[in-house]
Amino acid sequence: MNGTFIRLWPQTASHYASQVDTLVATFTGIMLLFVLPAVVCLIVFTFRYRQGNAVERQQRSQDNHLLEITWIVLPFLASMVLFALSARLFFEAHTPPADALEIQVTGKQWMWKFQHPEGQRELNVLHVPAGRPVLLNMISEDAIHSFYLPALRLKQDVLPGRYTQLWFQADKVGSYQAFCAEFCGTDHSTMLATLEVQTPTEHVRWLASAGSESSMAAQGSVLFRQLGCSGCHSPSAAVRAPRLEGLYGRPVPLADGNITIADDGYLRDSILLPQKQVAAGYAPIMPTFSNLIDEEGVQRLIAYIKSLANTDPTDD
Ligand code: HEC
Ligand SMILES: [Cu+2]
């Protein structure tokens, strides 16, 4: 879309984006406030005090405390205003609302893959509803990528081996270009995606038409059996392994005496690098699954384990 058209100013698809623009305008305004008088004086004095001009050059005033205090205090206050405005936006960008719609993103040379909680999967196109907070949980299958949405004024590195997050609430329906903003190899420049912001009703219709028989959690539970996880992690297993019901979001005591929280990153490491953090009281016998599943499979397994968060291991 708009492949040949270069915009002077990116589209604006969210309230956050307009706030970023306001910040940039304020910053530019404050800069001009200081730079313009200096430039004007520079030009005026260049002519006024030219060699050969008959002007008074002797009685320069040496100290003017009021003037000095003014030019220390005013820029300080101005920079504090900028600091407050940008810190507020920074915190907003880093605190996703709890009710955000979570979508899994995998960056891979050279494409973007998306998985919706209801199980729909997309390649290089992401459909989201307008007016609803969306949280992207992102990871890379290979090099470092960066998911860049100019219309939302947001950019976040997408790393191998670690989840990073980005959240937004698009307000304006439309198609917006997304880029990879971190040079990641030969076809980096073609690593593009389209963000399709739809009305909530359109989005519901799209979800239904995008064809998914089962949710991510249900797909994860199939994997859980296919990969043999259930062979160890079920009450009937002959092996002693921790139950995964009620695990997500809880503190986990580790064999090395530390306590960690069972978040997405911990679950991912437990599956791909089981020796990294061993749960206290268990033998480190869990094999790695790093050569059996890709990051998308891990995301489905995590969705399944998350869906067990409010169940009780003693239920059955
Ligand atoms: C050979 C038996 C075995 C298999 C197969 C196995 N696990 Fe494990 N798993 C364990 C044991 C034992 C532990 C506890 C020791 C540790 O943390 O490594 C564990 C720990 C975990 C933990 C951390 C639990 C906690 O309470 O901290 C998670 C999550 C997990 N496994 C998920 C899986 C998934 C998903 C699969 C399938 C892809 C799987 N496991 C396959 C034996 C197994
Ligand atoms: Cu890339």
Image (cartoon, rainbow, N blue to C red):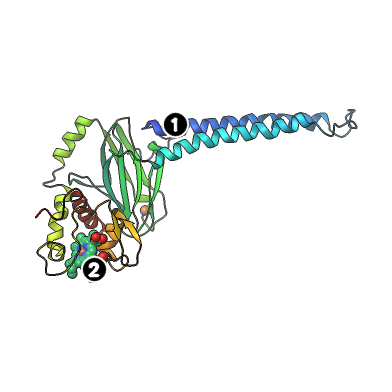
In the image, 237 versus 8, the foreground residue is 237
Tell me the residue that label 2 is attached to: 282
Q: Residues within 10 Å of mark 2 (few under 14, many from 20)?
A: few
Please tell me in which quadrant of the rendered image residue 255 appears: bottom left
The residue depicted at 67 percent of the width and 33 percent of the height is 73
Relative image position of residue 237 (x, y in whole percent): 11, 66
Compared to 15, does 155 lie above or below?
Answer: below
In the image, 190 versus 179, the foreground residue is 179
The residue depicted at 65 percent of the width and 31 percent of the height is 74
Tell me the residue that label 1 is attached to: 19
Helix, strand or loop at mark 1: helix
Q: Disc 2 to disc 1, how far (Cα)?
A: 51 Å
Relative image position of residue 56 (x, y in whole percent): 89, 28
Relative image position of residue 189 (x, y in whole percent): 38, 51
Mark 2 residue type: Tyr
How many numbered circles does the render carry?
Answer: 2
